[in-house]
Structures are given as structure tokens and as C-alpha cells.
């Protein structure tokens, strides 16, 4: 607000400091800008409400659950079937399992989460939360809202132990919610399985709930890491037999057994049930993690890309996959 030079107020300010005239001249601008903070008063710490501090309780209320169920059954599920033509194995192993349970899966693609959720049996599907990386899915407010609503995602710290996120996950499991967790801590960069982190084993040991090993095969070819292009390709989702921690088994040993169970399912997707069960645990884990070789050899070993026949030259599609990623 500009003060006319003819007013008595302006004439009275002529001999004063410029700062005083400026302060009075800006009266009326407060509603359009942030107020100044007094220099003699200490500022409180800013409230953190993103990352592991994001409150997801609203996404488990009835209106959000109803919206999510409608989208999951009528949009996500048909799209997943159209894109991947999924083949589900081992679903009968869940018939006698009482929820809640912890579903531990490998992680090849962003497609894994909606595909797994849409293929869970109905009695698990609509009361399941997904452990999502706090630094990736909850680093922006809009992303936090979207993934909490669509996937019932909860933030999990994947780079270090965080008591708040682990306590929240344990409380939800004990409250009757199933949990989906990708134990590798991130998507595979080349389609091969990565070493498992012990978070799922810790939660299962703490809550006493069973772990259901799950293996997703082929989603990396549909939507690989670093690519924004979706390719149609068949996928296989395999459920394993539920396992629980033994009384004398610590988190590290139980985590190794979970990794071996998922690796056995990976071997089953490549061969058959009998051959996979005859493979020792250590050998199954090594095979699931791929050959210890150069990038193009590892890509070669995965098989041809979608749309190419089995007789395609593997050197061509192998190098193409490396360039695309």
C-alpha cells in the first residue's frame, strides 16, 4: 500500500529511518505473503509427514477400502490379465491358511504389486497392505496419497532399520491385515533375483504369522526397470507352501530359508516341480541369482524378448536389453 506524500503520516515519517517507513508502507500485504518470524523466538522443528512419517491410517478406512476394491476387481485385474495372461500355480496351498499371512515375493518390475494383489484369493485380496519404499513412493505428498489409496501401501525404510515402520507393519499384521513385501528391497536391474533382506523374516518371527513364498516370473519382460514401455508377455505367479519360523531359528536363518523357498519356486517356473524339489537350497539360490558373468551373458541366459521366437539370436536381444535398461 503506497502512502500519498501529502498525508500527515508521510510527512511525519520524513525524518525517520527508511526501515520504519518501509514497514508501515507494507501494512496490508500480510494476507498475500507469509508473516515474518520474530527474531527473539526460536522456531519449532518442521513437522515431518512424508517418508516413514506419512500417516496411512485413512487408507484403511471403509470408503478408501471400498474404492480400492472396486478398482482392483474391475480395472487392475482385467488389465493385468490382458497384458500378461497370467498363469497361477499353487493357489490350492492357501485354502487351509488362516489370515493374516505375510506374502514374500521376488521383485522384477513395478507390475509385480498390482499383478500379485489382483491374483490373491478374494479372502486375502481386500485386506492386504503392501510394504513400499518410503524414499521412493512416499517422497512426495501426491505420490503418498495415490499409492496409499490404490495399493494400501505403507512406508518401509529399506536402507536401514527403522523402528517406526517395523512397528507399524507388525501392528497391522497383529490386527488382521495381510502383508505383501518384496524382500529384495528393490526391483531387479536385470531380471535375476537379488539377495533377500531380513525384514520379512523379522516380522514373521515377531508376529508368529506364516510366510507364503511367492515367485513372479516374466514381469521383467513386460515392464523392466528403467523402461516406460509396456510389452505384452505371458507371466507366471507361483505360490509356495506356507512356512513358519522354528522355535530355535533366528531371523538370519529364517530369512535364508525364505529365500531358498522362493528360489525353489523360481526353479519350478523354469523346469518342473520334481526337479525343483531335488535341487539343494544353496544351488537353487545361486541359480535364481543368475550366472556370475558379464551383463550380456546374464541377459542372454534369461531368454528371448517378447515378440521374438525361441530361435532368435540371443546375442541380438541380449545386447538390446542392456541398451534399453
Image (cartoon, helix red, strand yellow):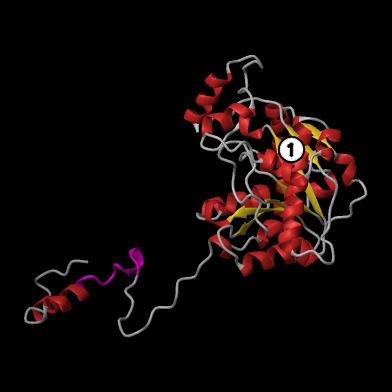
Q: Quadrant of residue 89?
A: top right
Q: Residue 199's spot in the image, x, y percent?
A: 67, 59
| Side of 88 where 149 appears, left or right | left
Residue 182: percent from the left, percent from the top? Answer: 67, 49
In the displayed structure image, the side of residue 124 where residue 145 appears, left or right: left
Quadrant into which the N terminus falls: bottom left
Instruction: Note whether residue 59 is visible.
Output: yes
Residue at figure coordinates x 17%, y 73% from the top left? 22
> Residue placed farthest to the bottom in the image?
40
Say whether residue 67 is left or right of residue 18.
Answer: right
User: Which corner quadrant of the image does residue 233 belong to?
Assistant: top right
Query: Eyeballing the image, is 249 above or below 183?
Result: below
Q: Name the residue under label 1.
A: 266
Give the residue drawn at x 18%, y 66%.
Answer: 2
Region in magenta = 24-34
Residue 197 vs 282, above or below: the answer is below
Left/right placement of residue 2 relative to residue 175 reads left
- Which residue, as the protein is rendered here, is positioned at the far left? 15
Amino acid at each position: 500500500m503506497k502512502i500519498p506524500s501529502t498525508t500527515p503520516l508521510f510527512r511525519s515519517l520524513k525524518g525517520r529511518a527508511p526501515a520504519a517507513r518501509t514497514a508501515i508502507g507494507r501494512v496490508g500485504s500480510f494476507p498475500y505473503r507469509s508473516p515474518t518470524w520474530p527474531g527473539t523466538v526460536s522456531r519449532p522443528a518442521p513437522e515431518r509427514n512424508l517418508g516413514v512419517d506419512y500417516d496411512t491410517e485413512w487408507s484403511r478406512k471403509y470408503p478408501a477400502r471400498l474404492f480400492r476394491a472396486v478398482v482392483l476387481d474391475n480395472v487392475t485385474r482385467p488389465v493385468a490379465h490382458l497384458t500378461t495372461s497370467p498363469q497361477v500355480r499353487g493357489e490350492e496351498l492357501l485354502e487351509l491358511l488362516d489370515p493374516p499371512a505375510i506374502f514374500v515375493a521376488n521383485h522384477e518390475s513395478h507390475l509385480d504389486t498390482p499383478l500379485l494383489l489382483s491374483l490373491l484369493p478374494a479372502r486375502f485380496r481386500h485386506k492386504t497392505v503392501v510394504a513400499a519404499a518410503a524414499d521412493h513412493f512416499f517422497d512426495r505428498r501426491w505420490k503418498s496419497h495415490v499409492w496409499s489409496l490404490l495399493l494400501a501401501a505403507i512406508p518401509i525404510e529399506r536402507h536401514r532399520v527403522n523402528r517406526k515402520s517395523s512397528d507399524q507393519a507388525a501392528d497391522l499384521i497383529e490386527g488382521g491385515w495381510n502383508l505383501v513385501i518384496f524382500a529384495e528391497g528393490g526391483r531387479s536391474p536385470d531380471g535375476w533375483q537379488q539377495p533377500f533382506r531380513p525384514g520379512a523374516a523379522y516380522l514373521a518371527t515377531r508376529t508368529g504369522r506364516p510366510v507364503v513364498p511367492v515367485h513372479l516370473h516374466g514381469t521383467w519382460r513386460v515392464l523392466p526397470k528403467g523402461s516406460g514401455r509396456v510389452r505384452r508377455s505371458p507371466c507366471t505367479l507361483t505360490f509356495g507352501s506356507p512356512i513358519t519360523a522354528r522355535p530355535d531359528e533366528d531371523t538370519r536363518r529364517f530369512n535364508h530359508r525364505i529365500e531358498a523357498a522362493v528360489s525353489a519356486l523360481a526353479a519350478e517356473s523354469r523346469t518342473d516341480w520334481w526337479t525343483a524339489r531335488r535341487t539343494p537350497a544353496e544351488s537353487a539360490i545361486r541359480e535364481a541369482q543368475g550366472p556370475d558373468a558379464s551383463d550380456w551373458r546374464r541377459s542372454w541366459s534369461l531368454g528371448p524378448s517378447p515378440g521374438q521366437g525361441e530361435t532368435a539370436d540371443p546375442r541380438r536381444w541380449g545386447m538390446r536389453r542392456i541398451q534399453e535398461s
